[in-house]
Amino acid sequence: MLQISQADVDRRLSFDNPWWTAGGDVDPGFRDLPHRSYLPSLLSLVRNRQIRRAIILMGPRRVGKTVMLQQTIRDLLQSGVSGSRILFLSLETPIYTDRPLDDFVRRFRDRFEHDRETPLTFFFDEIQYLKDWEIHLKSLVDSYPAYRFVVSGSAAAALRLASRESGAGRFTDFLLPPLTFAEYLAFVGKEESLIRIREGFDPPVATPDIEALNREFLHYLNHGGYPEAVFNAAVRGDSGRFIKSDIIDKVLLRDLPQIYGIRDIQELNRLFMTLAYNTGNEVSLEELAQSSGVSKTTLARYLEYLEAAFLIRRVRRIDQSARHFQRATSFKVYLTNPSMRAALFGTAEETDAAMGALAETAYFAQWFHLPDLMDNLYYARWSNGEIDLVTLDPKNQKPANAIEIKWSDRPGTDAKLLRHLSAFKAGNPGLTACEMTTRTHSGKSTLSDGSTVSLMPTALAVYRIGKFQLAWHQFRLSENHRTEPG
């Protein structure tokens, strides 16, 4: 039986690295695409060679990870780095299957006669397809301190990196979310006309035309989370096929079974469809086990896999006094991108009953690039009340903010809709920040204790989070990269 020859591998490497040829550049298909807002942060990390850490670019499929890697390569080339000092390859390419990373490093060094002190940069795309990739990567970081390693992953990375056992002090995580609403508005050229930044004001953002902003928000919910859907009219016209076939099915039917050895693919698929339809709602393992016929143990494992693939995120429950439950049998589930629900079950209209859950999902998704802050997001539910999202102070586990997300203007005129916030605040007297979103109404309202609650249109609130949390993300990333041990 014929084996893949090294000559075939070398030819494929030359094809994947056109900048090895004099005057070569990245493919125009990558070069001409707009930059995501997260690119400057990634470039800063890649350029910093003072710390011996590999960069792990994680995120769902089709949110632009490969594009960002290619744009990073172009930035290096334009800054004067020789193309012969950059290697890119995707572990998803069949010809590279099961080959150790060190083999690529060694052959690349030999091809261009580099030594161990030459400042080389390696980009390994879709790293999860290499078994025990953390061990391989840590070994490379330890063995070649002068080299910079940048890898990406669409699945498994979240679970593997959570323990930090193999990569402790050797990896810097960079989480790339689906498009934020702020990025979407910038990409479609509507940010300047629909958003007003007001420094020194509360709130710091406003819109001159809330109805127009809501129309764009609806477009964002239906297909705006994926860059390709924003730029390609054909994809937008058939987003169900594009998102379901090219993203969801590849994860459920190929990635997860291949990585975790799942045998009953249809069982996993049914579970995800149930969760996707119920995005923004509370579910329990008991209910899921009864409806699917799958054991709780298997369900718990599947939920971890779906989170590792960045398809869903679970949010834990607290009570009216912000106390945790010892046995958490219920949780809320959110799609990491509201566009997935539209692709699976049809596009939403502004008057649909699902708009409330979709708006809540979009609000939650804007925090996706800040996993440490997401770990402090909860929902509160007690016998006669519920709060959609509560942020807890990580130091004392006390509520810092309580948010109710509505797709209605009733909160501006009906004080009864504020009763849950009033009850929660009564049980948490130290809580100072309460918010409620609406469809179009802005302003203030008063809780039963006389304190105020901020009212803001949901679309504007979602924009604000995505826009201003990006600055926080950049700060935290630079601080962690600078201060953690190398």
Image: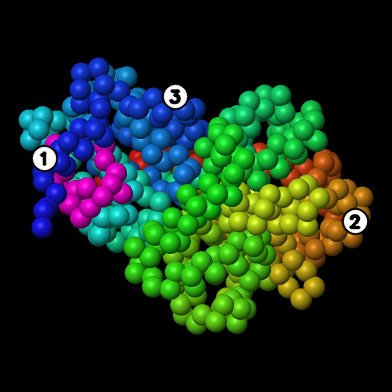
Mark nearer the N terminus (2 vs 3)? 3
Residue 206 marker: none
Q: Give the image quarter of residue 309.
A: bottom left
Mark nearer the N terminus (1 vs 3)? 1
Q: Residues within 10 Å of mark 2 (few under 14, many from 20)?
A: few
Instruction: Please identify, in this view, whether the residue under mark 2 or under mark 3 is nearer the observer.
Output: 3
Q: Give the image quarter of residue 285.
A: bottom right
In the rendered structure, which segment of residues is drawn in magenta? Answer: 88-108
Task: Name the residue carrying label 2.
Answer: 415
Q: Which residue lies at the image location 50% right of the left edge and 55% below the top edge?
A: 248
Seen from the viewer's position, the closer of residues 119 and 486 is 119
Q: Is 283 within the magenta?
A: no
Q: Amino acid at mark 1?
A: Ala
Question: Do the numbered discs 2 and 3 sit on residues whose CB atoms are within 8 Å?
Answer: no
3D distance between C-alphas at marks 2 and 1: 73 Å
Task: Name the residue carrying label 3.
Answer: 32
Q: Which residue lies at the image location 22% right of the left edge and 48% below the top edge?
A: 96
Vertical arrangement, residue 417 with respect to residue 25, above or below: below
Q: Secondary structure at mark 2?
A: helix
Image color mode:
rainbow
